[in-house]
Structure formats: C-alpha cells, structure tokens
C-alpha cells in the first residue's frame, strides 16, 4: 500500500466516524496514551524500553495482555514486526497517529544537513549513537504513514547544543508531506496542578491541512513565576533570533485572565489520606525497605472533594475505589524533623540552616546532661550526620523545596524516586515528601491508573510522563483538525452521574 493510498483510506475511515488509532513510541507508562484515549482515540500499541513502564502501559490500556506488557527496544523492533506482534496486519494501515518523544540526546550536535541525510539515507548513520533513535523514529513515520505525528519533549529541545532540534524535525517532516508546527505549552494552563513546561510538535499530512496547525486553547489561568518565564526565554533564544529563520515555531495560545484559576497543590492532593511520617517512624510502622504499591488505605475522614478530585476519582475506565493504593513515601528518618520546620517555598539553604539549629539544640540538651561530645570528635561528627544533611548550600540551593499549598506544584522530575526532596509536602504536620499517589495526582493521573513495580520505579514513571490532561487537550485539538468541526464530538471524561 503506497503512502498516498494509505493516507486517503485512513482519512476516509476517520471522516466516516472511525476512531483514530494511536501508536505511542517511547510511551513510558502512558501519559500521552491516557490523554489521547480520553479524547476518543484508540490506543493500538506502544513501544517502551523500560520493563516496569511497559507493564504499566500494557496493564492500563490492554488489560494486561502480555503482548502489550513486553518491553521493546525501538532499535531492534521494526514497524512491520511490531504490527505482527500486536496482530494488526499491514503496518501502513495499522496506525493513524504516532505520538511520543525520542530522548533529545538522540539529536545532540546532529546538524540539519545530517538530519536530512539521515532521513534520505538512513543506513549511512545507522551506527551513529547521536542519530540512532531519530533514525528509528523516522522509520516508523515512513512505515506507518500516519495522518499525524505528535512529539513531546523538554523546552531545551529548541536550544540543545546550539541547535533548534524541533525546527530540524519540522524540516524533515515537511519533506515527507507534513505541515508541522511546534510551541511551548505549560501544563498549568490546561487543568494540571503543576507548572510543567513542554515542547509540543504537531505534524499533520498536507492532504488534511494546507498551511497551518492549531494548538489547544488554555482552560485555566496562572501568572507563572519568573523562573518559568526566564527558562522559556532561554529555550526560545534560537527560535526568536533574527537569524534563526524559524518557519515551524508558533507562539503558544494566550490564556485569558478571566479563565478559572490554575488548580492548586492543595486542591489536587488535600483529600488523600494523611501520612504522619514522624509518628509512623517512632512507632516502627515506617521502616527501611522496598515500598510495594498494594496496600489499600481508606479515604475515610479525608473526603474533601472538588472538581479536580472528582476528575481523578471518576475518570472513565480508571475510577477510584473506596480506598487508595500507592500512598507510600520514602524512608528519610534524618529529615522528617527538618521538613516540619520549613516554611512553604523554603529551599535547601533554609533547610540546612534549620538542621544546624536542631543540631545545636541537641548539643545543648546533651550538655545539660553532661553528655555533650567533644567538638570535632568522631562521636560529634556522627551526631551531626544524624541531624545535618551533607550538601553544600551554595552548590545545591534547589535540591530541596517545600511546596506551597495555594499554587500548582513545580515541575516533577523522574529522580523523585531517588530523593523526593524537591517536593516536600506543604503540611508541616505530615512533614514528609510527597507519596507516589500524590505525585500521580500532580501529574493528573486518575486514581484508578496502576503503576507496575515498587515505589522508586513508580516515581520514575510518573516523573517521566506527559500529564494526561495536557495530552487530552492536545489530542482534542488534533482530532478537530483531522475531522471537520461538524464531525467533532468531545468525549465525556466522567462516568454517568459523576460529572463535577
């Protein structure tokens, strides 16, 4: 089946009411997939290298079908073999939309001329580690002949090693018959309780759109902190430079200040069961060791619901139950008492100062008991290590941060699984980092979405994901462009009777 024939048949099918079929490359646990599914797309398959993330995706989108739970390396999995593995037949007819985002390291220092050569002669650079994943992504576009491609990545993709990688991708996709545009979208403007800035690139076949691509209009408003606007300016430096000659960049839609205010951290997680870390530590209930995600904790007594909470509890196909799972946290016995003394917005310098204050108080207490160790002795050093973190204030100023209840959370990162200090719970009574489920809520994963593995892999999956509500907004905008406005019908997000 030729590309043009495949494209025309897919377009006819969609405009006759068929659901667009999505292949999610570099899918992770499925943030993009969930948003596209909620918008009315069918998730036909995914490719993901990480075993836990692949199992999460297969569990949530294919009822645990082992074919879909299997981890796959895109460099050794051809498009044709993937279609056969999923029982989808001819690969050029199997998928209507490709979504995902190759890791940006794959593009580093690969100039536009090389990208063109890769696209036209992929074997020439097959062994170049800088281009390998890009080659495979292009292979899938070539083989699947999708009507549309959606790529998500970090804003630095627009200024990565002196290259505007998004512009280079636009150039290649234009040669393949697509109209492509990219922009920066912040998740907080789309109902996500997190200020997460992302590059979104949408490419649509020229048979569908002639000269432009649209991005979703914001549903919420927030005055972003200066750090976010500054980072955006750095990311756009090449794009907006007079000599940049950017043809693919499109300014992000502007949020009106009469829109509903962005969802706050407290609105997002305030209903979840309380975890009193210091009390649990003292009682022995909280101990070192692997944290499984199979303990059900009732919501009872913490039933403060709002529109956002109802979305998370009543998302069709991913409804919550009377109890919540994965409400687990990291074991950090030295630091819970420090967390309790921090104010919202405090970072590592304040944490270090407060820890030294606690240490001085302990020295005073021991002195009154005539048990104070000699300053600088091994005993003194060991005692200090139980109170004061070892990091340099100047080198790690942003390592810790206590969240503010009244604003969306700062960007969640995958390394939550390694420390969790970047998102300390705003409630000093709980004095702890956020839990797995709280991280999921801040990313807009519904309560019925399951994460494979234990705590650390779950944190990594969540931190790496695209927020599903942002993905849903992108998907709805794309669906309007694939179908005429008359054919577009917004999919319900909530079960009958559960709409907020």
Image (tube, rainbow, N blue to C red):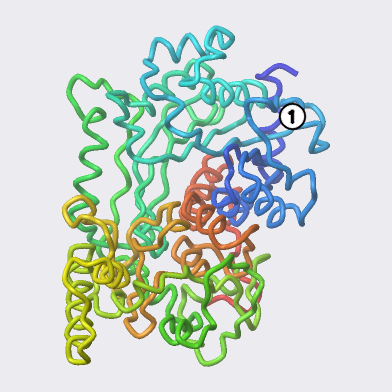
| Percent x, y of residue 325 | 61, 73
| Percent x, y of residue 323 | 63, 81
Between 283 and 229, the residue placed more toward the observer is 283
Q: In which quadrant of the rendered image does the N terminus lie?
A: top right
Q: In this view, does 231 lie to the left or right of 96?
A: left
Between 197 and 162, the residue placed more toward the observer is 162
Q: Residue at x 22, y 67 (%)?
A: 377
Between 443 and 435, the residue placed more toward the observer is 435
Residue density around tag 1, few if under 14, some if 14–19, many if 20 or more, within 10 Å: many
Rendered view: 399 above or below 446 = above
Rendered view: 307 above or below 94 = below
Q: In this view, does 317 lie to the left or right of 234?
A: right
* Tag count: 1
Q: Residue at x 49, y 22 (%)?
A: 173
Rendered view: 449 above or below 117 = below
Q: Which residue is drawn at 55% across and 14% down?
A: 127
| Percent x, y of residue 164 | 32, 26
**Residue labelled with disc 1:** 93
* Residue 190 falls in image quadrant: bottom left
| Percent x, y of residue 255 | 29, 56
- Label 1 secondary element: helix
Q: Which residue is drawn at 34% across and 40% down?
A: 155
Q: In this view, does 416 lie to the left or right of 472?
A: left
């Amino acid at each position: 089946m030729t590309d043009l024939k495949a494209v025309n048949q897919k377009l006819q099918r969609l405009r006759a009411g068929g659901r667009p079929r999505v292949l999610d490359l570099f899918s992770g646990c499925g943030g993009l997939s969930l948003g596209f599914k909620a918008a009315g797309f069918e998730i036909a398959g995914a490719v993901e290298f990480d075993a836990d993330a692949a199992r999460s995706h297969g569990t949530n989108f294919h009822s645990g079908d082992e074919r879909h739970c299997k981890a796959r390396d895109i460099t050794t999995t051809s498009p044709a073999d993937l279609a056969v593995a999923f029982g989808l037949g001819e690969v050029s007819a199997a998928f209507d939309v490709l979504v995902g985002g190759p890791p940006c390291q794959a593009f580093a220092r690969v100039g536009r001329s090389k990208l063109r050569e890769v696209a036209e002669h992929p074997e020439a650079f097959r062994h170049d580690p800088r281009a390998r994943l890009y080659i495979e992504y292009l292979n899938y576009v070539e083989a699947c002949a999708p009507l549309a491609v959606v790529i998500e990545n970090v804003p630095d993709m627009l200024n990565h090693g002196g290259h505007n990688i998004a512009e280079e991708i636009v150039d290649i996709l234009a040669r393949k018959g697509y109209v492509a545009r990219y922009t920066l979208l912040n998740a907080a403007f789309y109902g996500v309780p997190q200020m997460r800035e992302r590059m979104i690139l949408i490419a649509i076949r020229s048979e569908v759109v002639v000269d432009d691509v649209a991005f979703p209009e914001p549903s919420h408003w927030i005055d972003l902190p200066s750090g976010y606007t500054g980072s955006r300016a750095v990311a756009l430096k090449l794009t907006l430079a007079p000599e940049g000659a950017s043809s693919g960049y499109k300014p992000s839609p502007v949020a009106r200040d009469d829109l509903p205010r962005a969802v706050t951290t407290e609105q997002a997680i305030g209903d979840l069961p309380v975890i009193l870390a210091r009390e649990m530590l003292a009682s022995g209930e909280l101990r070192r060791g692997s944290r499984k995600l199979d303990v059900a904790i009732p919501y009872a007594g913490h039933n403060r619901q709002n529109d956002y909470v109802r979305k998370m509890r009543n998302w069709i196909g991913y409804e919550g139950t009377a109890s919540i799972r994965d409400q687990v946290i990291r074991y950090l016995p030295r630091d819970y008492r420090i967390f309790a003394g921090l104010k919202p917005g405090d970072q590592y310098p304040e944490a270090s100062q407060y820890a030294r204050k606690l240490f001085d108080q302990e020295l005073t207490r021991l002195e009154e008991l005539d048990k104070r160790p000699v300053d600088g002795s091994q005993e003194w050093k060991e005692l200090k290590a139980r109170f004061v973190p070892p990091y340099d204030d100047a080198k790690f100023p942003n390592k810790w941060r206590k969240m503010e209840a009244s604003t969306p959370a700062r960007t969640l990162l995958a390394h939550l699984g390694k420390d969790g200090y970047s998102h300390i719970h705003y409630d000093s009574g709980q004095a702890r980092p956020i839990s797995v489920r709280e991280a999921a809520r801040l990313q807009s994963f519904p309560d019925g979405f399951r994460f494979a593995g234990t705590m650390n892999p779950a944190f990594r999956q969540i931190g790496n994901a695209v927020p599903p509500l942002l993905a849903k907004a992108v998907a709805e905008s794309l669906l309007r462009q694939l179908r005429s406005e008359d054919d577009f019908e917004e999919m319900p997000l909530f079960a009958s009777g559960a709409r907020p």
